[in-house]
Image (cartoon, rainbow, N blue to C red):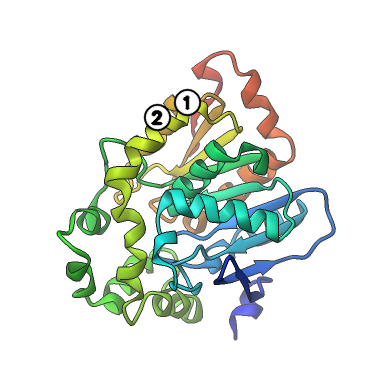
Amino acid sequence: MNAEQISPITTYFRVCDGVRVRFADTKSDSDTTLLLLAPWPESVWAFRRIWRHVAGLGRVVAIDLPGFGHSDQSRPELIAPDTAGTFLERLIDEWGLGAPHIVGPDVGTAAALFLAAKAPERVTSLTIGGGAVRFPIDAGGALKDVIEASSLDVVRALDARTNIGYAVEAGAGRDSEPEIHEDYVSAYDLGRFAESARFVRHYPEQNPVLRDLLPTVSTPTQIVAGADDDLVPWSNNEYLNELLPNSEIHGLDAGHFAWEQAAEEYGRLIVDWVNGGYRRVGAAESPDQVGEITR
């Protein structure tokens, strides 16, 4: 059974701003567009379990950001939160996506926030979370080790295939979903993991910049993440909810890979949000109206 038989996702490649980007696109004719940013160290297949939920909302486009998944790593300067945000602005314009609802878990969180801060007219709403965007940085496990490594050479010395295989087992098991598992692992083999790690190694200098931008982000924002994430602790999501002026927060009964581990609830929250829920946060009068833990 191949990947396309497991999920309705079909992947393509297209060049944007000189970068060959892997993406999926429902190509639906709709006034509503969703742009999904694949998490690290996975790929667009991370959205396979919510795809049927979101596909009915309108046109859905999912991408591997430059440097991630199976997109090119030919421009290392784009493998950083702020420049990834700028790249998204170009992609939205070049691909005619209008002002999409962006779903950006994990590394997509920082990229989406930089985009919303600098080009708010390009975004209708955000669904983010599970990204180590807090300052001071709060990260755990292997993520903390990569951020704090003395150099990229230390990261290059890791056995990427073994380490990535272990990391993504919770989201796509080697035995239960071998083709998805291999798609993730092969995306970061042969030196690609160390190159992709440039993104999170920018957090020490870029998280303080983002901290100052967050109160200016007026885009309606839904923060959704696993409440039991040991790589990106819950404090990162609370931090966003405290600093963003128009946000609500949902903690799911899951670890880091909430989009796969709690896919039904994750998908339901996106559907409710895009179908009009995003309009309610601007009218919220107190923190009690915008905070909840869903279990």
Callout 2: helix, strand or loop?
A: helix
Callout 1: helix, strand or loop?
A: helix
Residue 217's image quarter? top right
Give the image location of residue 75, x and y in percent: 44, 68
Q: Nearer the viewer, residue 16 or 64?
A: 16
Q: Name the amino acid, label 2.
A: Asp
Residue at image mark 1: 215
Residue at image mark 2: 212
Crowd tier of the residue under label 1, counting other residues whose Cα lies within 10 Å: few below 14, some 14–19, many 20 or above:
some
Q: Is the residue 256 above or below the residue 292 in the image?
A: below
Relative horizontal placement of residue 250, taking residue 255 as reference (left or right): right
Give the image location of residue 96, x and y in percent: 74, 57
Q: Residue at x 83, y 53 (%)?
A: 30
Relative horizontal placement of residue 36, taking residue 215 as reference (left or right): right
Q: Is the residue 187 above or below the residue 230 in the image?
A: below
Residue 237's image quarter? top left
